[in-house]
Amino acid sequence: MLRSWGLSIALAFFPLAPAARAQSAAATPYKYFRVGNAKDASVKPHAGYALMGGGKDLDEAFQWLCGRAPGGDLLVLRAGGGDDYNPYIRKLCKLNSVATLILPTRAAAEDPFAAKTISSADVIFIAGGDQANYINFWMGTPVQTALNDAILRGIPIGGTSAGLAVLGEYAYSAQGDKPDDKDLDSRTALENPFHPRVTLVRGFLEIPTLEGIITDSHFAKRDRMGRLLAFLARLNSPDNKGQPASAPNIRGIGIEERAAVLLEPGGHATVVGYGCAYFVDPYDKPALLAPGKPLTMGEIGVQKVEPDETFNLDAWEGYATRYLLSADAGVLHSSAAGGAVY
């Protein structure tokens, strides 16, 4: 399972070797935990992106991510919870240190400590949780700037669940959800792609290889294909105010739980773990896309990539099972055997 969100801790924690200890200084808007060496290492990271589908954490994906900066300093970012990832990653990877920075408010994201800490990391991992918090608390702050600066410097970055959701150029922000709302399901999104809960943002992160892409997690288990198609219908519509007029087709990547797409900067990707990844390309514009109306949309190409197989994002081709989907008045139809969607 995802590293759990632990009990809230009143005091901030700071890097004191060999493990983080509480500091009795005045409370800060963030929380920081660090294990390992207090002094940062000097290593040369290699860019790469670990797109993790959520569920129980996948050792192989973390080891790949750590291997992009061996002996370096890894930083976990989250908006709530505790330092559950620190001992897990510390045991799994040979790193100088592992730290968790919790930024639960915009005030925390605007504290100079946050951007400084991100800027000194050799590897960055964005944990699961609620991506609405990442968008509401971090977008438009020095945290967003520091993350995009890290991308430009070639810092490897990974994310799982909500952390995966914010890696693409486009993201489902979940801003329309109340804290106690259930997950946005495919039926709701297909019956009305303009439902208030269908909220999309652009440009939180600027990973070149993920330009023109929206990602989704927990894909088959939570039956999210339909909602991804609704997102793509909206994003590829002329009514989408966030899309430049000259933008190419926006595509989607859905990743199952306990699976990950390990992505090189040049676009070469390998699927690892115990589930599949789905590379989704809408060939046709929506035939009916209107507020309050079920979606009708023509051919959508799906390439389903099994574990240990590869895919190239630049060519949008890989070792995959290929089939077509369509939506007729909010109901999905598939060309796959037995009408399978996954």
Image (cartoon, rainbow, N blue to C red):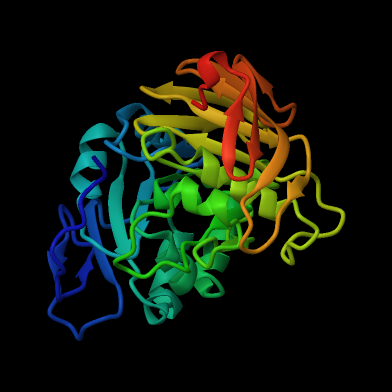
Judging depth in this view, the residue of 265 and 322 nearest the camera is 322
Q: Position of residue 52 (x, y in %)?
A: 42, 38
**What is the quadrant of the N terminus in the image?**
top left
Most foreground residue, 35 or 62: 62
Residue 211 position within the rendered picture, expressed as x and y whole percent measured from the top left: 69, 47
The percent position of residue 220, horizontal first and vertical second, equals 42, 33
From this view, report whether residue 196 is shown above or below residue 154: below
Q: Which quadrant would residue 111 be assigned to in this image?
A: bottom left
266 with respect to 37 (left or right): right
Q: From what the image shows, is residue 218 above or below residue 244? A: above
Q: Which is more toward the observer, 84 or 71?
A: 84
Observer able to see residue 150: no
Instruction: Report the residue that reaches farthest toward the right.
Output: 246
User: Residue 304, image x and y in percent?
Assistant: 55, 22
For the point 64% across and 38% down, the residue is 327
Q: How many marks?
A: 0
Whether residue 18 sits left or right of residue 99 in the image: it is left
Q: Is residue 304 above or below residue 100?
A: above
Residue occupying image coordinates x 50% and y 30% = 262
Q: Residue at x 61, y 62 (%)?
A: 292
The structure residue drawn at horizontal position 29% and vertical position 36%, both measured from the top left corner, is 57
- Residue lying at the far bottom of the rendered structure: 26
Q: Quadrant of residue 249?
A: top right
